[in-house]
């Protein structure tokens, strides 16, 4: 029996390095997770790209203190459009619109001028399906602006229409 008894120091000494190895691995993994989370947070907030000099050109100018020169707006006058509205009754109401398109770049005006017949066709077809009630109020005008802008961007695919500005809207 005395030969089978293990000394107290031998049992504790064999397990001590094993436990400290697991602790080191857990601490190392935890430290990596914390550093990764902190790095991801700095990246998402835009702090890390700014520190590394990886800002987009617009933000790089703002960070350097240089304000980019504002571009003057580019407008393209649309021809007057008159369309019958979709309404029951003997006398059909009609809509007359004069508008301007605000373009993203000066080069876009040539593209839109070339696509003007198609754009006028899309506008007129859309307007003929509208009812007079849909044009009432500012919400109706806003909805009309969004629809016309979407159609203009569809026709002039490489060009970009920023806004549709109404000069005149007449419903009779």
Image (cartoon, rainbow, N blue to C red):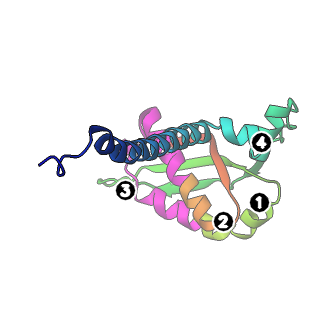
Q: Which residue is mark 3?
A: 86
Residue 126: image x %, image y %? 47, 60
* Residue under numbered circle 2: 156
> Element type at marker 1?
helix
Disc 4 element: helix
Circle nearer the viewer, 2 or 4 = 4
Q: CA distance from mark 2 to mark 4?
A: 26 Å
Label the magenta part by its dominant secondary structure: helix
Inter-mark Cα distance, 2 to 3 = 27 Å
Badge 3 crowding class, 10 Å Cα cut-off, few under 14, some 14 to 19, many 20 or more, is some
- Residue at the spot of label 1: 108
CA–CA distance between discs 3 and 4?
46 Å
Q: Secondary structure at mark 3?
A: loop
Q: Which label's residue is closer to the chain start, 1 or 4?
A: 4
Q: Is residue 69 left or right of residue 108?
A: right
Instruction: Relative to 134, say whether 105 is above or below.
Output: below
Q: Are marks 2 and 4 in contact (CB under 8 Å)?
A: no
Q: What residue sits right under mark 4 in the picture?
A: 58
Q: CA distance from mark 1 to mark 4?
A: 21 Å
Sequence-earlier tag: 2 or 4? 4
- For residue 84, which numbered disc appears in the image? none
Assess disc 1: are there few (<14), some (14-19) or many (≥20) residues with their C-alpha within 10 Å of its C-alpha: many
For the point 65% across and 53% down, which residue is it?
Answer: 80
- Contact between marks 1 and 2 (CB within 8 A): the answer is yes
> Mark 2 or mark 3: which is in front?
2
Element under disc 2: loop
């Amino acid at each position: 029996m005395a030969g089978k008894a293990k000394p107290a120091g031998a049992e504790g000494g064999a397990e001590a390095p094993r436990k400290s190895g697991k602790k080191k691995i857990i601490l190392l993994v935890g430290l990596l997770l914390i550093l990764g989370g902190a790095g991801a947070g700095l990246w998402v907030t835009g702090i890390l790209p700014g520190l590394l000099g990886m800002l987009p050109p617009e933000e790089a100018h703002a960070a350097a203190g240089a304000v980019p020169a504002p571009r003057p707006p580019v407008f393209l006058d649309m021809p007057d459009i008159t369309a019958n509205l979709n309404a029951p009754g003997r006398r059909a109401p009609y809509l007359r619109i004069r508008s301007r398109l605000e373009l993203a770049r000066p080069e876009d005006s040539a593209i839109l001028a070339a696509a003007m017949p198609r754009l006028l066709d899309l506008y007129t077809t859309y307007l003929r399906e509208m009812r007079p009630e849909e044009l009432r109020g500012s919400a109706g005008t806003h909805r009309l602006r969004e629809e016309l802008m979407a159609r203009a961007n569809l026709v002039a695919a490489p060009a970009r229409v920023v806004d549709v500005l109404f000069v005149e809207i007449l419903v009779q």
